[in-house]
Image: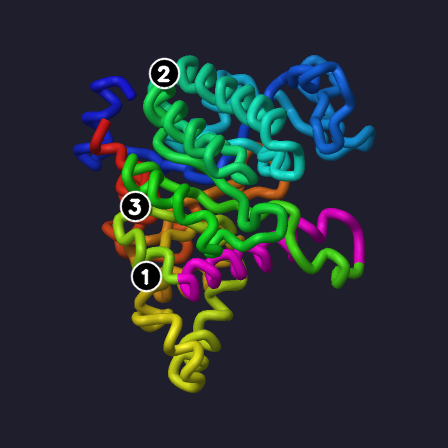
C-alpha cells in the first residue's frame, strides 16, 4: 500500500468501504503438469472479449467476466459501489484440494501470482488473501510464507472443509499456528459443501443453501475444537455472515450447559468464543445483519460482497446504512473492522 493510502486508512477519515470477500479468476490457466489430464484441473474457454467460461472436468463450471482479472474494470465497479479497497482471494473452486498436492500447489501458486500482479496494477487499492494447498500442510505452510513474506499478502483464504474434514480438526493446528505467528488473517469460504444430496432443485442452490450450511458447521468446529483458545491471536473470519452459525449458537450454548461431555471439551462458553470470530456482512437482509452484529460484536463484522459474481451484494454500503443509524458503527462495519482484520495499520 502506498504511503498516501496508508495515511488515509490510519486516519479513518474519508475512507470508502473495505471489501474482504471478493474473488479472482485468472484469464487463463497453465496446462496440467506433465501434460496429463488431471481431474479437477480448470481450463478457460473464451466466449467474447470480456467473458469466458471456466471448464472443469470437461463441463462448464461458471461463466465469468473480465472483472475477474482486469484491474481497471474492478476499480470502476468499486468506485460505483463505494468500495475503496478489495481483499482479493481465489474463486474457491480453484483451491484444488481434491487434486494431488504437488500439481495443486502449482495451480494455487499460479492463482496467487495473478493476484499479486493485480495488486501491482491496483494503485494501492488491492490487498491479497491467497490460496493454499491445504491437503498437504507442509506445502501449505511453504506457500503461506511465500505469499506473506515475498508477495506481501495480508493473509489467506481457506475452505470451510478440506476434502470433508472440518477446519477445527487438530490436524490443521500446525497451519493455524504458523498463520498466528506470521500475523496472517484467515478468511474461511464455503467449498464443496456437505448436504448436496438433500437439496431439491437446480445447481445454484449449492451457493444459495449449501454454502452457508457448510460455513456454519466450519465455525462450529472452530468453537468446539477450541481453536481460538489454543491460538488466541489468530484472526479468522467466516464468509456469508458466518452462515448458519448464528442460528446454531443458541443450541450450542444450551448444549454446553446441559451435557457434561460438551462442557468438558469447551473451557469457555460458546457465546464468548463466538465473539472472537469475524464474519462478513453478506446476508442480503437488514434484520439478519443487525442480528449478526448483536451476536458477534460491533467490532467483528466486516463488509463483504462476493464481487464480481452475479450472486453478490451490489449495494454493500447502502445495506449497512439501512440497518444502522449510528455513524461510528457504520464506519466500523464499512472499513474500520476490516482494517483491523487485515492489519492494514501495520503496513
- Which region of the structure is painted magenta? 201-225
Tell me whether the residue at label 1 lies in contact with that at label 3, contact meaning CB atoms closer than 8 angstroms.
Answer: no
Quarter of the figure with the C terminus: top left
Query: Sequence-wise, which precedes: disc 1 or disc 2?
Result: 2
Question: Could you say which quadrant of the image residue 289 lies in?
Answer: bottom left
**Does the image show residue 302?**
yes
Q: Nearer the viewer, mark 1 or mark 3?
A: 1
| 1 or 3: tag closer to the N-terminus | 1
Q: Position of residue 86 (x, y in %)?
A: 42, 31
Q: Main secondary structure of the magenta part?
A: helix
Determine which quarter of the picture holds residue 214.
bottom right
Q: Which residue is mark 1?
A: 275
Q: Residue under circle 2? A: 123
Verify CB contact (< 8 Å) between mark 1 and mark 2. no
Q: How many marks?
A: 3
Q: Secondary structure at mark 1?
A: loop
Residue sitting at x 37%, y 66%: 295
Amino acid at each position: 500500500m502506498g504511503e498516501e493510502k496508508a495515511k488515509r486508512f490510519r486516519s479513518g477519515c474519508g475512507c470508502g468501504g473495505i471489501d474482504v470477500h471478493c474473488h479472482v479468476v485468472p484469464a487463463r490457466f497453465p496446462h496440467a503438469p506433465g501434460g496429463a489430464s488431471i481431474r479437477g484441473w480448470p481450463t478457460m474457454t473464451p466466449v467474447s472479449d470480456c467473458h469466458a467460461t471456466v471448464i472443469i472436468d470437461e463441463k462448464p463450471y461458471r461463466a465469468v467476466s473480465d472483472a475477474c482479472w482486469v484491474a481497471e474494470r474492478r476499480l470502476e465497479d468499486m468506485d460505483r459501489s463505494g468500495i475503496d479497497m478489495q481483499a482479493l482471494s481465489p474463486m474457491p473452486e480453484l483451491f484444488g484440494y481434491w487434486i494431488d498436492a504437488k500439481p495443486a500447489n502449482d495451480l494455487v501458486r499460479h492463482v496467487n501470482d495473478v493476484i499479486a500482479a493485480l495488486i501491482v496494477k491496483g494503485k494501492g487499492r488491492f490487498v491479497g488473501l491467497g490460496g493454499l494447498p491445504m491437503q498437504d500442510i507442509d506445502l501449505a505452510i511453504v506457500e503461506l510464507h511465500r505469499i506473506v513474506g515475498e508477495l506481501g499478502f495480508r493473509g489467506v483464504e481457506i475452505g470451510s472443509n478440506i476434502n470433508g474434514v472440518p477446519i477445527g480438526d487438530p490436524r490443521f493446528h500446525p497451519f493455524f499456528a504458523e498463520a498466528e505467528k506470521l500475523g496472517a488473517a484467515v478468511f474461511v469460504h464455503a467449498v464443496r459443501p456437505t448436504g448436496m444430496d438433500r437439496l431439491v432443485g437446480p445447481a445454484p442452490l449449492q451457493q444459495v443453501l449449501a454454502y452457508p450450511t457448510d460455513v456454519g458447521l466450519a465455525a462450529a468446529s472452530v468453537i468446539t475444537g477450541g481453536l481460538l483458545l489454543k491460538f488466541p491471536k489468530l484472526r479468522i473470519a467466516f464468509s456469508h455472515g458466518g452462515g448458519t452459525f448464528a442460528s446454531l449458537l443458541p443450541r450450542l450454548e444450551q448444549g454446553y450447559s446441559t451435557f457434561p461431555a460438551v462442557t468438558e471439551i469447551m473451557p469457555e462458553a460458546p457465546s464468548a468464543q463466538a465473539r472472537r470470530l469475524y464474519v462478513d456482512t453478506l446476508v442480503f437482509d437488514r434484520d439478519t445483519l443487525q442480528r449478526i452484529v448483536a451476536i458477534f460484536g460491533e467490532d467483528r463484522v466486516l463488509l463483504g460482497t462476493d464481487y464480481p459474481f452475479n450472486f453478490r451484494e451490489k449495494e454493500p454500503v447502502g445495506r449497512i446504512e439501512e440497518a444502522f443509524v449510528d455513524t461510528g458503527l457504520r464506519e466500523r462495519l464499512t472499513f474500520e473492522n476490516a482494517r483491523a482484520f487485515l492489519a492494514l495499520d501495520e503496513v
